[in-house]
Each structure stands twice: as structure tokens, then as C-alpha cells.
Image: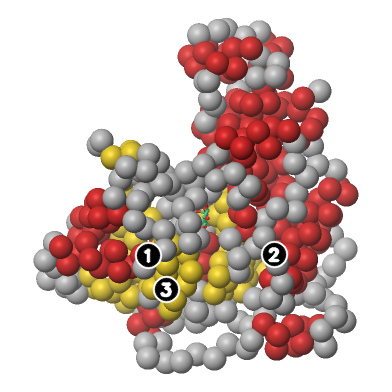
């Protein structure tokens, strides 16, 4: 049966976990790896950072600007404005026709709408794309993901593009002092109240994870690019149809932007009506999973999308397939968390908080439970325990925490242990692991 190809066995899960740990260690030792491990130059917060900060959450589907009040482990959003980012008016951010200054102009206006009157405020920018961190305050975009294609941003300093947009508007009330990945933001927001947070992750439109590595710094692993996974013919087909083939393999098998496409491709082998270009979205998958016994809403949905009404047994097939694709995503993600724990806590003795933000984790039926189940399965025989926590708004609040950290430690040079030193601290001399 078609859906069976998406089912992972316990051995598959063990292999993914091991492959991920090996990819992480390879990166830490300076060898070739599908992980990027980009340094954030930030440690975890102490929880005592205080004050009002601006945060910009520039994610996949939406962009949000907010003012956040930080007070001893408690973060409150005072004001927030949000807009959708796929298409704004006639601008289509996936078309390749939009220029950097249009994009950052729109974002600067959104931020100015939440700036408190007459105040100059420090801003933490959560930028949810792979970026090479130059300092806490600046990063260069390595490549667009999630099918974004705005011109003039790849290779550029992202906070400079934002600062230029403010300069064009004649204002200096916003000081962009930090730029972080959304996974780093999620980790920071959670660690602000739960100091044992060691992993921050996004399961939403895109997928990626950050972790506190043994040198004490938070790294953006860009784990969406991990490639040590068993693939199906449908994953290969989807990859070839995407804007950047051969890249972001884990993300294309696990993130909300792609799950509907995988289900559509696989279902089209059985259901002719899905062959003609209609495509299911992540929300559609949620509806299919939540549908009741007679699958009436699923049949209505497919009829709306394709003009064809499918039978109850075809609806049941679609539901089994959707379950398999969604469960596979959750299981793969959980295996990557286990792989990280194997590296950062090799004796498996500590307690870890794993913070997750993103619509897939927050809204997709059964998703969070499945991640939790596989985590528990993987830690069943060891002392270490992990709490999987929902960090809603984490990526945005994390921007404010990053701004606070940047302000608190301004001018300081923080020394992190080198990877090599951390490896020795963890495993003894190299190779003994
Ligand atoms: C990006 C990551 C980001 C993730 C979640 C991916 O496409 O490469 O940088 O963290 O999406 O938003």
C-alpha cells in the first residue's frame, strides 16, 4: 500500500538518531556535514535581563513586530502588529521580482507602527533563514529557503538592509542590536524562564533546530538541511520540483510547507483527480486528520479542490496516508532531538527542556504527541529526562531577549571554548567517544 512507504521502523528511528549525532560531531570536528552549526555568539540568558525591547519576527508565512517587556523571567508582549508575507498587494516574495528595499521597507513600516512614542528602542531581529552570523548584531543571508526569492538579499548584511530602510524613512528611533535565527529565539525565550533549556526548535512552515553546544554557546544547526534519512520516490520527486533541489532534505520531509505536497504526490498515484495540479495544504491535512467517521469533510474538501467527489474508502486511504506522512515528520524530528542529546549529554544524566514553536507543532493533530512518544521511547533506558514544551511566540520573544543580552553585554568579549576543547571535555581525548 502506498502509505506504507512512509512508515519508519524502530530501527529506522535508531539509525536517524545515530546519523544525526554523527553529523553533529562531524561538524564540531570540522569535517564535512549536512549540518551548518552557525554560531549565534549568544549564551543562554540568566533570567535577570529586564526592560522594554522591540522584536521583529521575520518568519516563513508571517512577519510580526512587537514591543516586549522583560522582567525577571517573565516576558509580556505589550504591542504587536502582524502581516502575511507570501503576497502583499501585488508583491509576490516567491517570484524573484521583488527587490530587497521593497521587502525591508514594508517591514520597517510595520516596526514603526509599534514603536512607543518619542523613544529610541533596541530591536532584536529574528530572521528565520540560514544566515552567517558576523556578530550578535549582524548576519549575512546564506540562501533563501521556504521558496522565498527576494532579490538583493543573499550575501548581504540583513540588519544593514533593515537599518537602511529606517534611514530612508528619516528615523533613528529603532536600533537593530541583535539578529538571530528563530530556533535560537525559541531557545532564548524558553531559557529565560527555564534555565535547563538546551534545544529550541521550529516545526512550522519550515523546520530547524538550535542547541546549546558544549562550549556554552547557542548554535543554529540548520538541521533542515540534514540528509541522513530514508527517502521515498515521492520525496525525491518533490525535491526535484522545488526551487533548490538536493538541499533542505529533512525540511522537505518534515515541514508544514511541504507535507501537503508530499501527500498530494503520493495520493495522485491512486486518485486520478489529484493528478491535475490541485495541491493539498498543511491546513487541509489537519482537516483530513480531524474528520469524523464518514469522512464527509474530506470528500467536500477534495471536491472543492478538484471538482471530483471521492468515495468513502478513498477518503479513508487519504486519511491513512496523511497520518503516515505527518507521523513520519514528527518521528524524524524527535530522532534529531535525541541525536543532539546523545552529543551534548553523552552520559545521559541531565534534565533537558526542549522548546518548540511553529504551527505544525502547535496545531497539527497528533504531531506534538508523536514527537513526545518517540522522545520517551528513545530515553526509556537512560537516566536523562526531557520535557517537550510549547514555546508559542518564542521566536518573537527570543528576539527581545537577544536584544537585552546584546545591550547587557555590549562591548564585552566573551570567550567560548573551542569545539576541540569541548570535545575533549566531553569525551576525553579525541576518538574515545
Ligand atoms: C530556515 C531556518 C529556519 C526554519 C524555521 C528554514 O527554512 O532555513 O533558518 O530556522 O526554516 O523557520
* Label 2 Cα crowd, 10 Å radius (few <14 / some 14-19 / many 20+): many
Q: Residue 156 carries which label?
A: 1
Look at the numbered disc 2 and give the secondary structure of its residue: loop
Does 227 appear above or below 1? below
Q: How many callouts does the rendering have?
A: 3
Crowd class of label 1 (few under 14; some 14 to 19; many from 20; radius 10 Å):
some
Residue 163 placement, left or right of 267: left
Q: Can residue 85 be seen in this view?
A: yes
Query: Looking at the image, is mark 2 or mark 3 nearer the viewer?
Result: 2
Quarter occupied by the C terminus: bottom right
- Report if the CB atoms under discs 2 and 3 are less than 8 Å apart: no
| Residue 12, numbered label | none
- Whole-percent x and y of residue 156? 37, 65
Label 1's element?
Answer: loop
Badge 3 crowding class, 10 Å Cα cut-off, few under 14, some 14 to 19, many 20 or more, is: many
Name the quadrant containing residue 120.
bottom left
**Residue 373 shows in this picture:** no
Q: Which of 71 and 224 is in front in this view?
A: 224
Query: What whole-number distance in Å separates the C-alpha atoms at marks 2 and 1?
Result: 24 Å
Q: Name the residue under label 2.
A: 33
* Residue at mark 1 to residue at mark 3: CA–CA distance: 21 Å
The x, y position of residue 77, in whole percent, is 34, 61
Q: Which residue is found at the position 59% from the left and 44% from the top?
A: 245
State the residue at coordinates (52%, 31%).
281
Q: How far from the left and from the top, in percent, is residue 401?
A: 41, 72
Q: In this view, does 95 lie to the left or right of 371?
A: left
Q: Which mark is residue 402?
A: 3
Specify whether 208 is left or right of 134: right
Indicate the secondary structure of the residue bearing disc 3.
helix
Query: Does 225 sit above or below residue 272?
Result: below
Give whichever of discs 1 and 3 has the lower sequence position.
1
Amino acid at each position: 500500500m502506498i502509505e506504507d512507504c512512509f512508515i519508519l521502523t524502530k530501527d529506522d528511528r535508531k539509525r536517524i538518531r545515530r546519523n544525526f549525532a554523527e553529523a553533529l560531531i562531524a561538524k564540531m570536528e570540522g569535517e564535512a556535514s549536512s549540518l551548518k552549526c552557525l554560531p549565534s555568539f549568544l549564551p543562554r540568558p540568566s533570567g535577570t535581563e529586564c526592560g522594554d525591547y522591540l522584536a521583529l519576527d521575520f518568519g516563513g508565512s508571517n512577519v510580526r513586530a512587537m514591543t516586549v517587556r522583560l522582567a525577571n523571567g517573565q516576558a509580556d508582549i505589550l504591542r504587536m502588529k502582524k502581516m502575511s508575507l507570501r503576497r502583499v498587494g501585488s508583491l509576490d516574495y516567491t517570484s524573484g521580482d521583488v527587490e530587497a528595499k521593497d521587502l525591508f521597507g514594508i517591514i520597517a513600516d510595520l516596526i514603526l507602527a509599534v514603536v512607543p512614542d518619542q523613544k529610541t528602542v533596541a530591536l532584536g531581529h529574528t530572521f528565520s533563514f540560514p544566515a552567517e552570523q558576523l556578530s550578535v548584531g549582524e548576519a549575512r543571508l546564506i540562501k533563501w529557503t521556504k521558496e522565498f526569492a527576494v532579490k538583493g538579499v543573499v550575501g548581504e548584511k540583513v540588519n544593514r538592509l533593515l537599518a537602511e530602510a529606517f534611514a530612508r524613512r528619516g528615523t533613528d528611533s529603532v536600533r537593530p542590536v541583535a539578529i538571530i535565527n528563530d530556533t535560537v529565539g525559541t531557545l532564548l525565550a524558553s531559557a529565560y524562564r527555564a534555565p535547563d533549556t538546551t534545544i529550541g526548535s521550529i516545526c512550522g512552515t519550515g523546520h530547524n533546530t538550535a542547541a546549546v553546544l558544549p562550549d556554552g554557546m547557542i548554535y543554529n544547526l540548520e538541521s533542515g538541511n540534514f540528509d541522513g534519512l530514508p527517502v521515498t520516490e515521492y520525496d525525491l520527486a518533490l525535491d526535484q520540483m522545488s526551487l533548490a533541489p538536493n538541499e533542505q532534505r529533512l525540511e522537505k520531509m518534515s515541514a508544514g510547507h511541504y507535507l501537503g505536497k508530499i501527500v498530494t504526490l503520493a495520493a495522485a498515484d491512486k486518485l486520478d483527480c489529484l493528478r491535475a495540479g490541485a495541491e493539498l495544504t498543511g491546513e487541509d491535512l489537519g482537516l483530513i486528520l480531524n474528520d469524523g467517521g464518514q469522512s464527509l469533510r474530506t470528500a467536500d474538501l477534495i471536491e472543492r479542490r478538484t471538482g471530483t467527489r471521492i468515495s468513502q474508502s478513498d477518503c479513508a486511504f487519504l486519511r491513512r496516508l496523511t497520518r503516515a506522512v505527518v507521523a513520519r515528520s514528527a518521528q524524524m524530528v524527535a530522532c534529531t532531538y535525541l541525536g543532539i542529546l546523545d552529543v551534548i549529554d553523552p552520559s545521559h544524566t541531565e534534565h533537558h527542556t526542549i522548546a518548540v514553536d511553529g504551527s505544525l507543532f502547535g496545531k497539527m493533530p497528533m504531531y506534538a504527541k508523536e514527537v513526545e512518544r518517540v522522545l520517551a521511547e528513545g530515553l526509556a533506558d537512560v537516566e536523562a529526562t526531557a520535557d517537550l514544551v510549547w514555546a508559542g511566540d518564542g521566536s518573537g520573544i527570543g528576539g527581545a531577549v537577544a536584544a537585552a543580552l546584546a545591550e547587557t553585554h555590549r562591548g564585552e568579549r566573551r570567550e567560548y571554548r573551542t569545539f576541540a576543547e569541548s570535545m575533549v571535555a566531553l569525551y576525553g581525548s579525541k576518538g574515545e567517544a
